[in-house]
Amino acid sequence: MTTIESEWETRELAGRRALVTGGSRGIGAAVVRRLLDAGAEVLTTARSATSTVPEGATFVAADVRTRAGAEALAAAAQETFGGVDVLVHNVGGARPFTGALAIPDEEWQDALDLNLLAAVRLDSLLVPGMRERRSGAIVHVSSAAVPAAIPQFLHYEAAKAGLENYSRGLASESAPYGIRVNTVSPGRVATPGGEATREQWARLDEGTGQDSATVPLGRDGRPDDIADAVLFLVSGRASWLTGSNLFVDGGEFPRG
Ligand SMILES: NC(=O)c1ccc[n+]([C@@H]2O[C@H](COP(=O)([O-])OP(=O)(O)OC[C@H]3O[C@@H](n4cnc5c(N)ncnc54)[C@H](OP(=O)(O)O)[C@@H]3O)[C@@H](O)[C@H]2O)c1
């Protein structure tokens, strides 16, 4: 039986305007669904639309690796909603290489643009509006593997480590304006991007020892495991939480 109280709780983001990057599949799509179910209006982006963009979300095609892409997205959010209350920077990823010294310059640049600078640029465009309204909630999606500093992914992990450090600084600077900034660090989650990357890694480096058998809780993560953590962090239930980094990894990785 649905009580008035539980119905109120499930609509805890009613009236909030949310922007989620990378919402066409995987973790981002799960976050979009959770925010829509909680009553938020959601605008999401990817480089191209797919049938897996959740129904009910507004979709804008943009490449967030460039300043121009971030500006187009921020302008679309302004035009659609007149402002953003909840920002989830979820895009990320990188190809593995045989080791740290084998990572070419352009792949370092791409990893920094996608995993760090895309968030920095989008925040720089959207946080001023949150400051004026003296409220906002931001989540940056990092990776639980950052403290492990896996050589095949150092470009990705260095960029995500930068994202975590940047998030903490933005959190302390933004707190007086009523804006909360937190990070979620997923472990191995079954998504199209995650599976493709792990297959590339296994081809490069047989016996990586990275499979669900190494997850203490005994299974891979589901996109909804991460989306639940994001929903909590942007909700009023986390109103005293900022500058945190929540590991959602089945207990697999050491905490940084
Ligand atoms: N899955 C895992 O095991 C795992 C583990 C640790 C951390 N993470 C992190 O979790 C986040 C989501 O991962 P995921 O596995 O769900 O990824 P995914 O399946 O590859 O999905 C990535 C999403 O981002 C979009 N995207 C990629 N590049 C973009 C760009 N330049 N501009 C705009 N959109 C772009 C993709 O659409 P288009 O390609 O069409 O642009 C897609 O919607 C990432 O930050 C990842 O680093 C994932």
Image: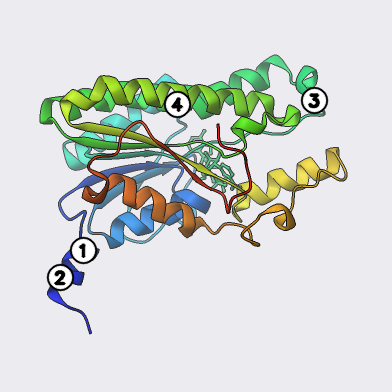
Q: Which residue is mark 3?
A: 99
Does residue 145 appear to the left or right of 70 in the view shown?
right
Q: Nearer the viewer, residue 74 or 153?
A: 153
Tell me if mark 1 has few (under 14), some (14-19) or many (20+) residues whose alpha carbon lies within 10 angstroms of its own.
few
Q: Which residue is mark 4?
A: 118
Q: Quadrant of residue 72?
A: top left
Tell me if mark 3 has few (under 14), some (14-19) or many (20+) residues whose alpha carbon lies within 10 angstroms of its own.
some
> How far apart, in angstroms, are the residues tagged by discs 1 and 2?
6 Å
Q: Which residue is mark 2?
A: 5
Report the mark closest to the observer, 2 or 3. 2
> How far apart, in angstroms, are the residues tagged by discs 2 and 4?
38 Å
User: As displayed, is residue 171 above or below residue 235?
Assistant: above
Q: How many marks?
A: 4
Q: Which residue is mark 1?
A: 9
Q: Quadrant of the C terminus?
A: top right
> How far apart, in angstroms, are the residues tagged by discs 4 and 3?
25 Å
Report the mark closest to the observer, 1 or 4. 1
Residue type, mark 3 in image: Gly
Horizontal and vertical percent position of residue 178: 17, 31
- What residue lies at 76% left-to-right and 48% top-to-bottom? 199
Mark 4, ligand 1, within 8 Å: the answer is: yes
Whichever of labels 1 and 4 marks the residue nearer the N terminus, that label is 1
Ligand 1 quadrant? Answer: top right
Residue type, mark 1 in image: Glu
- What residue lies at 19% left-to-right and 30% top-to-bottom? 130
| Residue 24 visible (yes or no) | no
Does residue 43 appear to the left or right of 206 in the view shown?
left
Residue type, mark 4 in image: Ala
| For the residues bearing labels 2 and 4, Cβ distance under 8 angstroms | no
User: As displayed, is residue 125 above or below residue 2?
Assistant: above
